[in-house]
Amino acid sequence: NKLYYAFRELGRVNRTLFLLKYINDVELRKTIHAATNKSEAFNDFVQWLFFGGDGIIAENIRHEQRKVIKYNHLVANMVILHNVHQMTKVLKAMQNEGYALNEQLLNGLAPYRKHHINRFGEYPLDLDREVEPMNYNVSFDL
């Protein structure tokens, strides 16, 4: 089909133009590299949280596989929320003690910390416990 071949060649031209721009533009490379690192960090974090079977989904039914992936992402997002909440509390305490929070300090923070998580522990739920309010208003000297 001639139309197929025409679009294939157009796609090759677009890819070549992008690669030339990528080679020439340092800022574009930095942006793509930063975005790729964030995605890889999240994927590593999700993979670490997915325990049992070395990350292999034992289901053969497509909708069950999607369900396992969504549940794993839900757990990852809950752990990220917990990490951000705890980091915010520490940053506020540092501010109250007189430390200046700057961009260099914040660049070293990531919500994918996992050394404090016990993946195989027991987590009893106390549904009657008061939940402390989440306040993420922290001012920074940027």
Image (tube, rainbow, N blue to C red):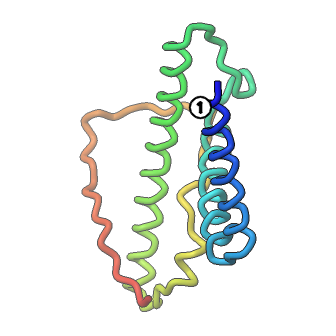
Residue 36: image location, x then y, percent:
64, 57
Specify the quadrant of the image occupied by residue 90.
bottom left
**Up-down relation of residue 45 to residue 119 (above or below):** below
Horizontally, is 124 left or right of 132 in the view?
A: right
Horizontally, is 78 left or right of 109 in the view?
A: left
Residue furthest top in the image: 61
Q: Nearer the viewer, residue 55 or 2?
A: 2
Q: Write the residue at 71% across / 57% down.
A: 16
Which amino acid type is shown beneath numbered disc 1?
Leu
As helix, strand or loop, the secondary structure at mark 1 comes to helix
Q: Write the residue at 56% across / 63% down.
A: 110
**Up-down relation of residue 64 to residue 134 (above or below):** above
Residue 28: image location, x then y, percent:
62, 71
Horizontally, is 122 left or right of 33 in the view?
A: left
Residue 54: image location, x then y, percent:
75, 27
Q: Nearer the viewer, residue 66 or 4?
A: 4
Residue 22: image location, x then y, percent:
69, 67
Quarter the C terminus occupies: bottom left
